[in-house]
């Protein structure tokens, strides 16, 4: 029996993965070699590969050059925690150690009492787990363990967080844990345990130990849709308006017309727009006063971006086609007359707050669709 539990726990630790939207996606630039039948085939493979920057086709070999993806450290560099809380700079989660010894339920209620969405720590990522373990390892008070928010009190073996969501993808059980009981007492509550290398242990819920509270990373506000990889929130302005007005309305919502700089963004936006009945959308590129196409959010030249998807013959540099239009059905780009009235897509970082402007919100068509389902 012990052997089976051990084998299972090893299997679980091998399978343990961060939940979607939780990982540090940063990675160095690299090359990938794949088979391709033609130059077009190779190009297609690049387009469908995350962060593919360029490609080279030679004798049925297709080399994809993958850009180093942006580190979450960059994405979340603005993370700020309330006083007394410590922030994980990589994930943006905020934590507080409550050093008072409490049973699990008291710890749960204590964490909730801090407001701002505070809860007994809900650990969905290896990055948050490692961050807390590093903090606990430095704690000189020699506490035997610290509570986090998991329990199987309601249904033995069915571990849930205090908000009822399952302890699913990511786990860090110590070898042989969860054991279920110790000294004749049930073990239904989850803690980081000193004598187990700060790995996870199920403990009797009446045990009095300190706790770790957490304020998780913010979600996009209502009506906005999150791209969990980039930490970007998207919304459609369905009211048709000229490019400049569309851009102003995005800015009023503390956002920008979208820029599509990576194939990952391209794939996400493609799915995001898929249920729409509109065919053309304004996106955030235009011709600046030197005659170059630039992304309007930071004025960087479109030609320098890792990804572009001009339709053939575009941009035509013909007069009056100075604003960037996205065709939904094939996701191709066109220069279009800036005075045309089209719906638009805005985006902002998850860390930026939406403006309180009610006027623009009236123009917003809520576009709901299922985010990528949780996969481990
Ligand atoms: Ca149990
Ligand atoms: Ca145990």
Image (cartoon, rainbow, N blue to C red):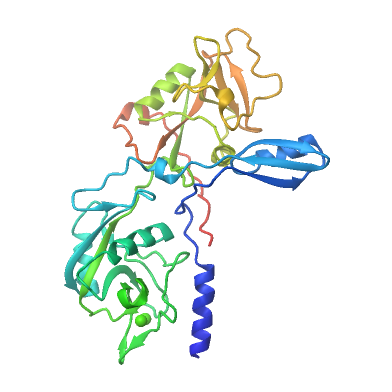
Q: Quadrant of residue 204?
A: bottom left
Percent x, y for residue 366?
A: 44, 38
Q: Is residue 276 visible?
A: yes
Vertical placement of 172 versus 235: above or below?
A: below
Percent x, y for residue 286?
A: 52, 18
Q: Quadrant of residue 141?
A: bottom left
**93 or 280: which is nearer to us?**
93
Q: For ligand 1, give the image quadrant.
A: bottom left
Q: For the point 37% across and 47% down, which residue is it? A: 219
Percent x, y for residue 47?
A: 66, 38
**288 or 162: which is nearer to us?**
288
Vertical placement of 346 versus 203: above or below?
A: above
Vertical placement of 169 versus 92: above or below?
A: below
Q: In which quarter of the image is residue 351?
A: top left
Position of residue 101 in the picture relative to residue 255 (left or right) = left
Q: For the point 62% across and 21% down, which residue is it? A: 334
**314 or 325: which is nearer to us?**
314
Position of residue 78 in the picture relative to residue 247 (left or right) = left
Vertical placement of 231 versus 372: above or below?
A: above
């Amino acid at each position: 029996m012990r052997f089976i539990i051990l084998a299972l726990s090893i299997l679980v630790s091998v399978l343990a993965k961060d939940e979607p939207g939780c990982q540090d996606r940063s990675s160095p630039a690299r090359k990938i070699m794949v088979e391709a039948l033609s130059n077009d085939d190779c190009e297609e493979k690049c387009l469908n590969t995350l962060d593919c920057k360029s490609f080279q086709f030679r004798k049925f070999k297709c080399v994809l050059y993958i850009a180093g993806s942006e580190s979450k450290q960059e994405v979340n560099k603005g993370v700020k925690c309330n006083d007394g809380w410590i922030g994980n700079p990589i994930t943006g989660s905020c934590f507080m150690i409550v050093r008072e010894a409490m049973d699990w339920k008291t710890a749960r209620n204590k964490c909730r009492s801090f407001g701002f969405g505070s809860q007994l720590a809900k650990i969905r990522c290896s990055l948050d787990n490692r961050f807390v373990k590093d903090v606990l390892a430095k704690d000189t008070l020699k506490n035997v363990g610290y509570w986090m928010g998991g329990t199987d009190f309601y249904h033995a073996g069915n571990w849930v967080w205090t908000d009822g969501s399952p302890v699913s993808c990511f786990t860090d059980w110590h070898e042989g844990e969860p054991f279920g009981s110790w000294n004749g007492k049930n073990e239904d509550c989850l803690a980081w345990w000193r004598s187990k290398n700060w790995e996870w242990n199920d403990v009797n819920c009446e045990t009095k130990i300190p706790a770790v509270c957490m304020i998780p990373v913010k979600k996009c506000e209502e009506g906005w849709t999150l791209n969990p990889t980039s930490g970007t929130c998207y919304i459609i302005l369905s009211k048709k308006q000229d490019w400049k007005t569309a851009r102003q309305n995005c800015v009023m919502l503390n956002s920008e017309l979208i820029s599509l700089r990576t194939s990952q963004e391209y794939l996400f936006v493609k799915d995001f727009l898929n249920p729409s009945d509109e065919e053309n959308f304004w996106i955030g590129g235009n011709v600046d006063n030197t005659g170059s196409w630039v992304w309007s959010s930071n004025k960087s030249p479109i030609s320098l971006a890792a990804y572009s998807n001009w339709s053939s013959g575009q941009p035509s540099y013909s007069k009056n086609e100075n604003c960037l239009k996205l065709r939904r059905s094939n996701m191709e780009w066109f220069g279009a007359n800036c005075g045309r009235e089209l719906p638009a897509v805005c985006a902002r970082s998850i860390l930026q707050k939406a403006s309180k402007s009610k006027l623009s919100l009236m123009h917003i068509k809520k576009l709901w669709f299922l985010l990528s389902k949780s996969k481990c």
